[in-house]
Amino acid sequence: DAKTTQPPSMDCAEGRAANLPCNHSTISGNEYVYWYRQIHSQGPQYIIHGLKNNETNEMASLIITEDRKSSTLILPHATLRDTAVYYCIVRVSGGYQKVTFGIGTKLQVIP
Amino acid sequence: EPEVTQTPSHQVTQMGQEVILRCVPISNHLYFYWYRQILGQKVEFLVSFYNNEISEKSEIFDDQFSVERPDGSNFTLKIRSTKLEDSAMYFCASRGGTGSTDTQYFGPGTRLTVL
């Protein structure tokens, strides 16, 4: 799986958009960008994933640059419950591939 | 919404004892996984299981560990002789199948404390 780089921590004011960046300059053509989050010792929670098009679901939006070397996860209106560690993971879809977690970005939503 | 469940939520055991951690994956999922997270560290992959056999395992998954899907619903992780360093959160995950929606869904975890 391609390596990803994320800032170790970020703050965001409650109600504002949280924009979490991720660099994945060595991503391969068949690798997807996945985002998970982990709220204090709970199980990792899937958020969103994409290949090259921007994606949106009820939780977040994923913006992938045209060259696919970086992406941004956007939480449009952050709440205190969004305080968590966010993991950007690049991996091939299909098969039984494991998820390889890095250190992620610790997002603190501030009241 | 379907979810992965795990029991117990917290298991305390003595060093050298055997423990079995239980997971009920999402119904009709085909791929099953165990991960662990030592306090303050990254989530680490242990093993993946498909078609009633191990498809991949990490270096952590040594002879002390085993997995089983004894029936159509449960997926278990057994640690034969626990060590202090086995203390961690253990997460089960499952995935439906191939394709772009092959997302892994994680359970809430079992906190294992080895004394």
Image (tube, coloured by chain):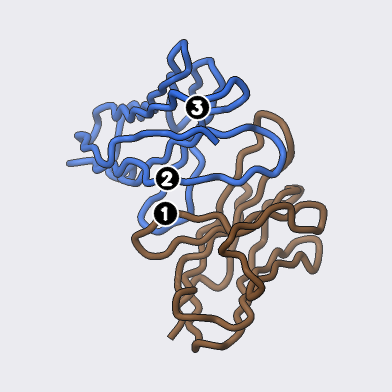
Chain colours: A blue, B brown
Q: CA distance from mark 1 to mark 3?
A: 27 Å
Q: Is residue B98 left or right of residue A33?
A: right
Query: Which element type, helix, strand or loop, lies under badge 2?
Result: loop
Q: Which residue is found at the position 38% from the left and 51% from the top?
A: A39
Q: Which residue is mark 2?
A: A102
| The one of A45 and A77 positioned closer to us in this rendering | A45
Residue A50 place in picture, x, y as percent: 54, 24
Q: CA distance from mark 2 to mark 3?
A: 24 Å
Instruction: Quarter of the image for the C terminus of chain A: give it.
Output: top left
- Host chain of mark 1: B
Residue B87 place in picture, x, y as percent: 45, 74
Q: Which residue is mark 1?
A: B42
Q: Is residue B82 above or below residue B35?
A: below
Amino acid type, label 2 = Gly
Q: Which residue is found at the position 72% from the left and 65% from the top?
A: B74
Q: Which residue is mark 3?
A: A57
Query: Which element type, helix, strand or loop, lies under badge 1?
Result: loop
**Mark 1 neighbour density, 10 Å: few (under 14) some (14–19) many (20 or more):** some
* CB within 8 Å, label 1 to label 2: yes
Q: Please state which of the two labelled residues, at mark 2 or mark 3, is closer to the viewer.
A: 2
Residue B53 place in picture, x, y as percent: 79, 58
Q: Which residue is found at the position 29% from the left and 30% from the top?
A: A18
